[in-house]
Amino acid sequence: MTQSLTRAARLQPQVEARFLAGAREASRFFMSKSNVHRTLERLVDRLTELEIPYAIVGAMALNAYGYRRTTSDVDILVRREGLESFKSAYLGRGYVEKFPGSKGLRDAAENVTIDVLLTGEYPGDGREKPVVFPDPAEAAVRGERFALLPLEKLIELKLASGMTAPHRLRDLADVIELIRVNELAEDLVASLDPYVREKYRELWQAAQVRDDE
């Protein structure tokens, strides 16, 4: 074997720096001390102050339901009129649009993106389907501090998203992890829209297989 084949490759400094920065940020995230957590808490305070119905979705909701995953943004579900009320009150006061006229926002102080989902829109490819983003005033479950979608509704939306958008396959992987972490039963399928039931059964079967098996 030649020397060129036995010499270990050297990790490039920029790759190593990104690895260390990522590890530090993940540590802050799971201690609830990240800029994403600060953005979420401040956003919820603003929405509550304006009496805007909302539900936390996305990776932050996954963490609430036991699947620990980091994220670099905040996903929130509101009505269209709720978004307009928020923009009227806070654009230029700590929040900016991702681009002029966009529904997405950015927390300027924390430099964190806020992805906004609107009631009545369709998950995944955005095309009409039986599953839609619900009205948070009716669908959300509230605690003392935050409002989330019920686990079944979150799973339903992720299934519809991953089924129809090839770039959203992570949503299907999220469902597998939610099934595992929460030890969900196969018969939960009865509480889901018929549009996604077969996919839930498929992923439920996949979730029963563990890597150590």
Image (cartoon, grey):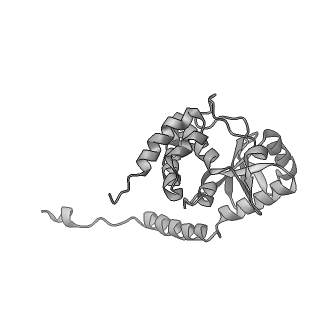
Residue 165 showing in the rendered view: no
Q: Nearer the viewer, residue 187 or 64?
A: 187
Q: Residue at x 71, y 64 (%)?
A: 38
Residue 122 showing in the rendered view: yes
Quadrant (top left/top right/bottom left/bottom right) for the N terminus = bottom left
Q: Residue at x 82, y 50 (%)?
A: 91
Question: Total number of numbered labels?
Answer: 0
Residue 42 as seen in the image, left or right of residue 185: right
Q: Nearer the viewer, residue 191 or 169?
A: 191
Residue 5 as seen in the image, left or right of residue 31: left
Query: In the current view of this chain or complex, which residue is farthest to the left?
Result: 1
Q: Residue at x 64, y 68 (%)?
A: 32
Q: Residue at x 36, y 57 (%)?
A: 211
Quadrant (top left/top right/bottom left/bottom right) for the C terminus = bottom left
As displayed, is residue 83 above or below residue 71?
Answer: above
* Residue 76, x across and y down, in percent: 70, 49
* Residue 114, x across and y down, in percent: 69, 51
* Residue 160, x across and y down, in percent: 57, 37
* Residue 204, x across and y down, in percent: 46, 46
Query: In the current view of this chain or complex, which residue is farthest to the top?
Result: 128
